[in-house]
Image (cartoon, grey):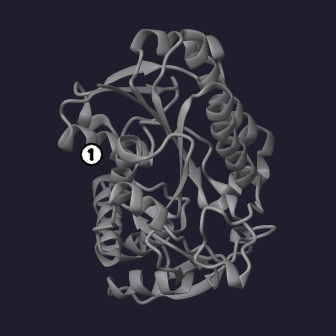
Amino acid sequence: MKALITGITGFAGSHLAEYLLAEHPEVELFGIYRWRSRTENIDHLAGKIRMIETDLRDYSSVQRVLGEVRPDVIFHLAAQSYVPSSWSAPTETLSTNITGQTHLFEAIRALGLDPVVQIACSSEEYGLVLPDEVPIRETNPLRPLSPYAVSKVGQDLLGYQYFQSYGLRAIRTRGFNHTGPRRGQVFVTSNFAHQIASIEAGLQEPVIRVGNLEAVRDFTDVRDMVRAYWLAVVHGKPGEVYNIASGTGITIQELLDRLLALSTADVKIEIDPDRLRPSDVEILIGDASKFRADTGWQPEIPFEQTLRDILDYWREQLARRSP
């Protein structure tokens, strides 16, 4: 089996590559990257993955790589995935996420390929969730509250449309918040952990800067999430959409408190107006019963371990950078 990962140099892509290499050595693994992509997340996997330079926004580039690899499975993870950036660059977010996926689908059709395509959609698509709609099922209305969320709705529905129109074997996974080591510093769990590690190392004043602490999120360890991606392509049903979630929500305040409990640092908390969004999703707790029924997936890594691993990751990163 040949598997192609778009976005392999990113957070989830690198963990998926690690998982496949460790647990499914029978899979021949390919990854695409842009010439300016940072590769530190996968440098330790050098020689185990065939990497091909490609830009999803360039159709001819996409067709060339698919014609060369002819994958049996595509994990489509590449995206502009940071919600705040979508406010400042909405056009780029929509173009990267929707046009890039359209190029992927059209190249599959042009080449006569028949891969299973897992599309990494997002719980952000649900957006404005009403109190009586929690936990959220796949049938819940989509009320996106950011350009990023709109772009993910576009990807999601394109997957449905191409399945219905052309029989493309798309499986849409609406992942709720996932986190773990190597998560980008701009994302909340990683950002808090980085700030705490920086304070411990004497690199930052003992002040944690935060945004909205009242929002409720459903967190899954990224290593459980990428295992779910694999189970989706093996046991999921083409054309279907699946929530992937723990089913448990915590406030961002509780998240911060749990991280601080893993440190001896004495800190103050300050609201940073720049971290507040024009509109925020107040609550996201997912119902993954449909996915569990079709694949048998269950999250296995306790959230406390996830938080400890993130904090230790940033401690190690800062120690390496110290003179």
Q: Is residue 239 visible?
A: yes
Q: Amino acid at mark 1?
A: Tyr
Residue 271, relative to residue 323: is it above or below?
Answer: below
Quadrant assignment, res 239: top right
Residue 302 in picture, x, y percent from top left? 30, 75
Q: Indicate the position of residue 268 as horizontal and vertical percent values.
A: 53, 89
Image coordinates for residue 205, horizontal then vertical, percent: 50, 77
Q: Give the residue drawn at x 43%, y 62%.
A: 179
For this rendering, which residue is in front, 133 or 215?
A: 133
Which residue is tagged 1? Answer: 19
In front of the other: 109 or 215? 109
In-image side of 211 versus 16 (left or right): right
Q: Residue at x 27, y 40 (%)?
A: 20
Q: Is residue 3 left or right of residue 23?
A: right
Q: Quadrant of residue 131?
A: bottom right
Horizontal arrangement in the rendering, residue 95 relative to residue 186 (left or right) = right
